[in-house]
Amino acid sequence: MVPRETSVEVEPEIAAELFGDRIELARAFTDDLARRGEELGLIGPLELPRLWTRHIVNSALLAPLLSGRVGDVGSGAGLPGIPLAIARPDVSLVLIEPMERRVAWLEEQRDRLGLDNVQVVRARAEEAPFERSLDQSTARAVGALSKLIPLTARLVRAGGELLLLKGAAVQDEARKAEKTIAKWRLTDVRVEELGTGMATEGTRVFRATVN
């Protein structure tokens, strides 16, 4: 049997570039997630060797695109919401999560890190009390676009934007979601690559304007 790798990934150099003078907050969050994440059911045991690159840095790559008040649907472990709140203290993050123990984790991290730009709301996305009131909405590892678009678009004001972090199959997901995209009257729909030319694994974001 191959022994399970449990060592935490060494912090990549790109992290300091993304978080700047708030890198210590990112380190504190990552350390706590590494120590307690598996026990609390927030991350799997195989995620530790890629925790920085796959999760923390991957989330923070979205930071330059944020503005105003942003909802993170299905925030879970706080990805991407907590890294984004650290990287962008000028932006308000609303972390929306239905599970009580995950809500407790998010509130603990907000208070421990002093993130006064974070609001934690316990609610299912379809019941969250922010209909047509947020400037942007994001989500990561929540579901396919055909199901995710209705959950996130309902929260965003006219002229606001969806910024959904997706994997390599995003173009195929977008094709399968064409009817949903049309139903929600999304415009300026495109997929953008984040992290290109940077010393890290890139990611993709599905972007669209809500009308």
Image: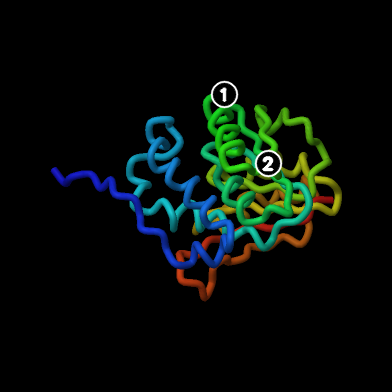
Q: How many marks?
A: 2
In the rendered view, tell whether residue 157 sits above or below residue 14.
Answer: above
- Residue at image mark 2: 118
Say which amino acid is labelled 1. Answer: Glu
Q: Mark 2 or mark 1: name the one nearer the start of the chain.
A: 1
Q: Position of residue 27 (x, y in %)?
A: 47, 51
When asked about the image quadrant of residue 6, the answer is top left
In the picture, the disc for residue 100 is 1
Q: Position of residue 17 (x, y in %)?
A: 54, 67
Q: Could you say where residue 156 lies in the image, as x and y percent from the top left?
A: 79, 45
Q: In front: 139, or 47?
A: 47
Could you tell me the amino acid type at mark 2?
Answer: Val
**Residue located 57% across and 60% down the image:** 19
* Residue drawn at 69 percent across, 58 percent down: 207
Q: CB under 8 Å between callouts 2 and 1?
A: no
- Callout 2: SS: strand
Q: Is residue 153 left or right of residue 172?
A: right
